[in-house]
Image (spheres, coloured by chain):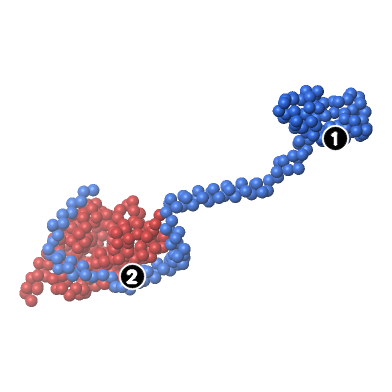
Amino acid sequence: MTTAIDTDTATDIDLLRRMRTGAVDAFAALYRRHQGPLYRFALLRCGSADTAADIVQETFMGLLTERFRFDPLRGQLQHFLFGVARNLVLKSEAAHGRHVVLAGPDDDDGPGANLADDTACPLARLLDNEAAEGVRRALALLAPHYRDAVILYELHDMSYADIADICQVDIGTVRSRLSRGRAALAKRLAGWRDTVRAA
Amino acid sequence: MMDTRNTTDRDPLFDALRAEVGRLDPPPGVEQALLQAFAQRHPAKRRRARWARWYDAVTPRGWTLAGMTGAAGGVLALALAFALQAPDPDHGTRTLAALDDDNPFIALDSAERIAAEPAPRMVAADVPRTTLAALGVPLTPENAGDSVRAEMLVGADGQPLAVRLSTLQ
């Protein structure tokens, strides 16, 4: 038995097993492997760099303390971490009195009901690139459950099955949310583009 | 569950956002805080890392070999301990056992005379085999010059009363 493994090529499970035995290099490798995507998801999801950093920290702290217990038999660690981060975002939004729209059984929300609070921090400027910032702002105005699907699909290259696993919904719901989210986004961006052109 | 993801259908609308956001990472303070928390949670592991290094490097085959060697050593130590501590079953009785051989005494006098002897004593002596031929001791040209260890019951006057051959071969 040897525990000297290459942290670059080791699987998440191997690293997690070593981390639980006290191997700090395994924990650091896990963090470096997943921190970027988690942070970018949280950033786009909540629109605040500070909150996103807190969410990443709390996610890994939960993994470390086993407050959030990962079961390898139930899926990938990456999906588990995204799921934890998503729940922490929802909790943060609830704590800050944001308007969080939960998915209904038919997932058929009208455009007005889907909007996040326009006065919240997601609309503060985050990106220098104007086109990117425009898309980000439009994304921030989507209902949270649409935003999850669009961010994970378009910006994290995840499959419907991955998103279903993270959001704990079925694939049909993911497909529906993605379609509606894209449509709402296109509508908003059309208005934004008109404004830009007029200016 | 079939993956319906088609990587070619990514919306180009997000290209600029992908490029812009893809460069962002959490601030370094997050990793530092987590590593500090890890160190606090696993202090004992860190202290014994030096000890654990050789310990972890031993292969399962090595552990098996070490276990077998240890077990063999234990058995050897137990055997040695028993050998040193257990009383020798022959100790102090070897001479007596020779004297108390199962060979019967052969009377050389009458039973009344032997029974009437007030102070008989036992005498051990080497008796020439030829003198015992009359008692039925096998005698051949090869062993004619040998002696036979005999125990003799002797009366107070030195008269032999009975004899027992203890090393008859």
Residue situated in front as seen by the camera: B118 or B13: B118
Read off the chain for label 1.
Answer: B
Q: Residues within 10 Å of mark 1 (few under 14, many from 20)?
A: some
Residue occupied by mark 1: B122
* Residue on which the image places disc 2: B31
**Measured from the top left, where is residue B19 in percent x and y?**
17, 68
Q: Residue at x 87, y 35 (%)?
A: B121
Q: Earlier in the sequence, mark 2 or mark 1?
A: 2
Extreme residue in the left direction: A198
Q: Is residue A172 left or right of residue A20?
A: left
Q: Residue B70 at x, y = what percent?
A: 53, 51
Mark 2, residues whose alpha carbon is within 10 Å: few (<14), some, or many (≥20)? some
Chain letter for the red colouring in the rendering: A
Amino acid type assigned to the residue bearing label 2 in the image: Glu
Chain under numbered label 2: B
Query: Amino acid under label 1?
Result: Met
Residue A192 found in image quarter: bottom left
User: Which colour is chain B painted?
Assistant: blue
Point 21% across, 54% down: residue: A160
Q: Residue at x 30, y 62 (%)?
A: A8
Q: Nearer the viewer, residue B113 or B16?
A: B113
Image position, residue A138 (x, y; %): 16, 67
Q: Secondary structure at mark 2?
A: helix
Where A183 sits versus A199, above or below? above
In which quadrant will I find the C terminus of chain B? Answer: top right
Return the residue nearer the eye: B129 or A82.
B129
Disc 2 from disc 1: Cα separation: 99 Å
